[in-house]
Amino acid sequence: MRYPLITLFFCFGWNTYSQAPLADSLDQINSIDFKKAEAEVRVLPKEKQVSGTIEYNFQILKSIDSFYVDARNMNFDEILLNEKSVAFRNTGQRLWIKNEFSPSENNSLQLKYSVEPKKAVYFINWKLHEAIDAPKQVWTQGQGRYTSNWLPSFDDQREKVEFDISYQFPKNLEVMANGELIATSSNDSLKNWSFDMQRPMSSYLLAFAAGNYLMEETESSSGVTLQYYMPVSEEDKLEPTYRHTKQIFDFLESEIGVAYPWQNYKQAPVRDFLYSGMENTAATIFDHAFLTDSIAFKDRNYVSVNAHEMAHQWFGNLVTAETANDHWLHEGFATFYALLAEREIFGDDYYYWKLYQSAEQLKELSDQGKGEKVTKANASSLTYYQKGAWALHILREKVGKEAFNTAVKSYLEQYKFKTATTNNFIAEVEAAANLDLSYFMAKWLNQTAFQGFAALNSLKNSEFIKKHLEILALRETPLEKKEEVLSAALDFSVSDYTGQEVVYQLAGETSETAIKLYKKAFETNNIYVRQAIATSLERIPKQLKSEFESLLDDESYLTREVALLKLWMNFPQEVSTYLDKTKGITGFTNKNVRMLWLTLNLITPDYEPEKQQEIYKELSGYTSTYYPIEVRENAFGYLYQINSFTNQNLLDLMQGTQHHAHRFRDYSRQLLAELLTKEEYRQKFLALDDRLSQKEQEYLQTKL
């Protein structure tokens, strides 16, 4: 600690007489304006440490006696205000700077810090034995976890700063971060990556991702550089994963009417991410589970998440919500514009089908008395995303596309690099359309109930939806009375969605009429109609055996998975044929087909009995902590089905109960609770006590 004695005295004195903050967030926003930050950040993955320096340039707007920077659990080696030592107080949450400040420009705050982040930075596979060759990554998640865990910054999203950051990482990693990469340099085992931003942004949108990536680069029609990162080991998934990205980007720029506001746009997948994706400024991070090949693309692709996070670059990043009540200005807009982009790719029927599906969810919630206002703080994702998107869909229909687009453009331009409220946006629409929208706000934004009748009337603008609803209305009608209508719905070219509904209405039917319709459904060669047969038909009639077997050749991992299981159950005498045919198929990133195949192999006594140990070892090994969580969860599920857990599986499960990804943590805890209902497993877990971490031991004791 290199502070003069007088500085230490003032620090001690302040801690003695001033335990409460001397300014709150609102006062600070109105009193001080942080303009720019220049930082050097060093990341040591093996040690799980971050250290560095940051210098803020700021302007004092009115006289104050203190200000703060959010800094969670950080140690500071040096704190300089305008290059001089200054009194401060480190609460463990915030660093408070004490002084008498008068209005002034060109002030600087220099901080030298170190921290072991408890949140926001995630170190993947850095504690493994050297013999295990598994991808190592480091990535961040600022929203909901706060960037202030690894960089002295601002949790208040209203504070916008231009950040220029250099990162030091081990040489063997590629680094993606906000801004334009302007320089790299190497020093011993470390490599320095310098990124430049030219516009201010909220701190929660700062991010980096580091791993063994390759990167492909292209340009939008407007000349913006688009960069696609992909783990080297999964290079073959780059094109299908990022398919349509340029088209989405070009569409959003054109539809929104405001040029993309940042220097470039890049995206990188990471393992064990907390959410589907995160719209960090110009640097989206998304979950590894969305990596896809061309077969998986049909059932699970990145297009929707891709479009959603990209739309956030305008809605949330360029213009940020003023308060928690305005959060739908981020999520509702991103969902709506993503849906418009998907409409451009997949067509009108897709657009209205997605609206129909979300309307069903919202109506059900509303009928249960659980509906929420779009403008409610801390509302559910369904409310912010889907009800918000529906509100914008209805609003655009009400005022017309031209007025709507004019209003959106004016809203973005007026509040760019600032914050805005719901009222700010509505005022722009009222001005563009010359309408009073108080009734719209009351019904769609500030009412808990979902406007089901209005939504239905809007959906009926689609001829496809009208025809689909006619088929839906036949669900309770006897098959003989609707045969002709159902058959006509399977005529070329069959609708993906209505064709599936026809198949679902055949469930449980075995008459000649049903068999005839099933055969026609098979013959459509529509992958989704055939998939509906696979998922809905439990007992396979012999008349459909050959058709059902053909599902194993469909270009869909979901269809192949379900068809393999159904065939195994219905025709045990031919199991070897089915297992031979699907032996080399992996499936989605969660290895859905492979794990089903391994499990069926194990419970089919006469199939490859000499390989049982090898097969079990593979299936059991997929719970290991170095696999992506979607793989681990699938493996745990199958091991539970065959009731065969090794001690290592149980150790892996206990690790899962403390995992940073909440969805996997919740799954692991539920499975643990189920296993602990059986005495044999209670004893097995007790015997593991000395091999568990302290947190795992404590959690296990609460369950025992």
Image (cartoon, rainbow, N blue to C red):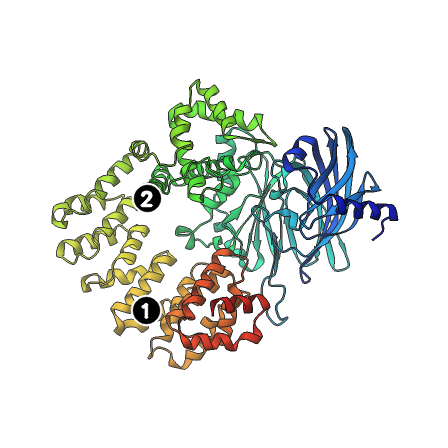
Position of 335 with respect to 69 (left or right) is: left
Q: What separation in Å lies between label 2 and label 1 (alpha carbons)?
A: 45 Å
Position of 315 with respect to 96 (left or right) is: left
From the top left corner, tell me how far across and down residue 314 is, in percent: 54, 35
Mark 1 residue crowding within 10 angstroms, few (<14) / some (14–19) / many (20+) = some
Q: Nearer the viewer, residue 16 or 529?
A: 16
Give the residue furthest to the front.
Answer: 17
The residue carrying mark 1 is 578
The residue carrying mark 2 is 368
From the top left corner, tell me how far across and down residue 345 is, in percent: 42, 40
Task: Give the mark nearest the N terminus, 2 or 1.
Answer: 2
Is residue 278 something that shows in the picture?
yes
Give the residue furthest to the top.
Answer: 434
Please count the marks in the image.
2
- Amino acid identity at mark 1: Tyr
Q: Nearer the viewer, residue 5 or 399?
A: 5
* Image height of 320 relative to 673, above or below: above
The secondary element bearing badge 1 is classed as helix
Is residue 133 something that shows in the picture?
no
